[in-house]
């Protein structure tokens, strides 16, 4: 600092930092000013703001580190520097805010990692309240030695930073004491109200996903192995009994049928010739019996293929609504005999299916009321009555263990369409509020401790 102009500039910047620290809205803002904005008047590589346990503070912690938005409390650097700050804070006595240079040799147990975490020249500045109570510390480190005029600036800033920290902690304590005083004044009545509330009876209930499925549907399956050639219906289309639903590719089957017909014609001709020979030749009678067996075999094979050709077109065994996924997923798809392709459902015969997670299980019996709230129409609801509860849990599509519950909708009222999804509320018995609130924590505790 060689000129009066430089001194005036530094003084103005110090006053600006003091004002910003005093006007900081919270401790995080104060920490940012302390470790980052102090570079306006000081040159350093690392700056740390550390708070300790005291009259105003709640716990010792590393509050701010220069260049970091928020220090990681679990990082190795945080553990190491916190141990150093805790020791330096304990060595400060007499209520002095004088900066103190810290030497690595004075801390032999920490010297091994010193060069990894800190530059060689370190300053420790105690942050004191107006009554001398130590609230924390400000640690500065750099590679070059500290000059006398810099130590004066550090001491001045440390004094004002300590007063600003005390002011912020005092304001926070005043704000927190307001509710505490109210609680101390009315805590007897609060406990009475809590005890009364814990014994208020409420009804057990749980809200879980639900879906409307057809009741007693007919599954249309592939009559034979083949490839789906055409779908003659659309999803959710109403069809009459014996209506054509789909056709399988018949090209390979028809070729086999034509070959079998020609083979049968050849077997008939061979049988006719052997029959003529058998009239005059005794050995021809044996040949004729063999040809008759071959003719019967080929005839049965042709009849079977003819029957299969008649099953290429699948028809509806009864009237209903066709339910299946997108037609593009089925066209050209290879199916095996017995594979489910689509189903026929009666729109008036539907049921509500819900899956109760194992962790939410309570006594659900036949006759329990279930209310469906459809996703598509949140202002509508449908009541249903449980008719069947699965005896054991099974894995659902999400990989969760659940109990399958089936319920019938109330008769005489409109029912939702097939495929409707939403949330269902299952109501159980009346229990005290305390049991309802503590049921899950007690279950987890019992599973954890094995009692």
Image: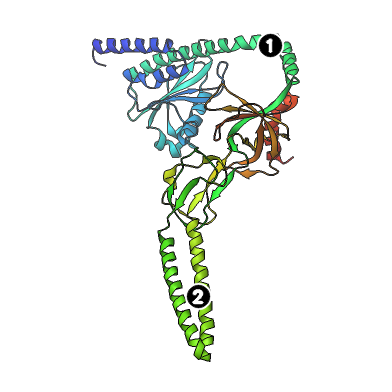
- The answer to whether one can see residue 281 in this image is yes
Q: Depth check: 410 or 102 in front?
A: 410
Colour pattern of the rendering = rainbow
Instruction: Give the residue number, with chain letter if any, for mark 1.
Output: 184
Give the SS element for disc 2.
helix
Q: Depth check: 325 or 309 in front?
A: 309
Front disc: 2 or 1: 2
Q: Position of residue 372 (x, y in %)?
A: 61, 28
> Is 228 on the left or on the right of 441, as rendered?
left
Question: Compared to 280, does 272 lie above or below?
Answer: above
Q: Which mark is residue 295?
A: 2
Count of all numbered marks drawn on residues in the image:
2
Which quadrant of the figure has residue 3? top left
Q: Position of residue 282 (x, y in %)?
A: 53, 91
Question: Compared to 378, does 159 lie above or below?
Answer: above
Q: Position of residue 445 (x, y in %)?
A: 69, 35
Q: Depth check: 72 or 365 in front?
A: 365
Q: Depth check: 351 or 257 in front?
A: 257
Can you say which quadrant of the picture contains the C terminus? top right
- The answer to whether one can see residue 433 in this image is no
Q: Residue at x 45, y 34 (%)?
A: 77
> Is 5 on the left or on the right of 389, as rendered?
left
Mark pair 2, 1: CA separation: 106 Å
Q: Residues within 10 Å of mark 1 (few under 14, many from 20)?
A: few
Which quadrant of the figure has residue 14? top left
Q: Residue at x 71, y 34 (%)?
A: 362
Q: Residues within 10 Å of mark 2 (few under 14, many from 20)?
A: many
Label 2 or label 1, whichever comes before in sequence order: 1
Can you say which quadrant of the picture contains the N terminus? top left
């Amino acid at each position: 600092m060689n000129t009066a102009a430089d001194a005036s500039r530094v003084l103005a910047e110090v006053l600006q930092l003091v004002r910003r620290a005093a006007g900081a809205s919270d401790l995080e803002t104060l920490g940012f000013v302390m470790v980052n904005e102090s570079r306006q008047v000081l040159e350093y590589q690392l700056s740390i703001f550390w708070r300790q346990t005291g009259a105003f503070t709640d716990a010792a912690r590393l509050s701010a580190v220069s260049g970091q938005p928020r220090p990681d409390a679990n990082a190795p650097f945080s553990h190491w520097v916190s141990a150093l700050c805790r020791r330096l804070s304990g060595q400060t006595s007499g209520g002095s805010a004088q900066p103190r240079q810290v030497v690595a040799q004075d801390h032999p147990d920490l010297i091994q990692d010193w060069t990894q975490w800190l530059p060689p020249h370190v300053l420790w500045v105690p942050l004191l309240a107006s009554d001398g109570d130590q609230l924390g510390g400000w640690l500065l480190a750099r590679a070059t030695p500290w000059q006398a005029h810099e130590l004066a600036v550090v001491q001045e800033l440390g004094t004002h930073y300590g007063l600003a920290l005390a002011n912020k902690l005092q304001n926070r304590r005043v704000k927190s004491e307001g509710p505490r005083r109210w609680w101390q004044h009315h805590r007897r009545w609060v406990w009475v109200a809590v005890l009364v509330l814990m014994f208020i009876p409420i009804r057990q209930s749980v809200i879980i996903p639900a879906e409307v499925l057809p009741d007693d549907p007919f599954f249309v399956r592939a009559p034979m192995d083949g490839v789906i050639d055409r779908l003659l219906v659309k999803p959710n289309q109403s069809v009459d009994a014996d209506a054509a639903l789909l056709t399988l590719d018949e090209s390979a089957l028809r070729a086999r049928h034509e070959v079998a017909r020609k083979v049968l014609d050849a077997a008939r001709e061979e049988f006719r010739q052997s029959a003529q020979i058998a009239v005059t030749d005794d050995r021809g009678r044996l040949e004729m019996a063999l040809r008759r067996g071959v003719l019967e075999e080929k005839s049965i094979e042709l009849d079977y293929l003819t029957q299969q050709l008649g099953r290429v077109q699948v028809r509806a065994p009864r009237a209903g609504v066709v339910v299946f996924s997108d037609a593009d997923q089925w066209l050209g798809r290879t199916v095996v005999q017995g594979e489910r392709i689509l189903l026929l459902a009666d729109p008036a015969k539907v049921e509500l299916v819900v899956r109760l997670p194992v962790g939410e299980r309570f006594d659900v019996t036949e006759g329990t009321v279930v209310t469906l709230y459809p996703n598509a129409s949140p202002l509508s609801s449908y009541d249903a009555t449980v008719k069947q509860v699965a005896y054991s849990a099974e894995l659902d599509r999400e990989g969760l263990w659940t109990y399958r519950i089936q319920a019938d909708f109330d008769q005489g009222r409109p029912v939702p369409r097939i495929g409707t999804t939403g949330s269902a509320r299952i109501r159980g018995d009346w229990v005290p509020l305390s049991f309802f609130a503590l049921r899950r924590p007690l279950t987890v505790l019992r599973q954890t401790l094995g009692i």
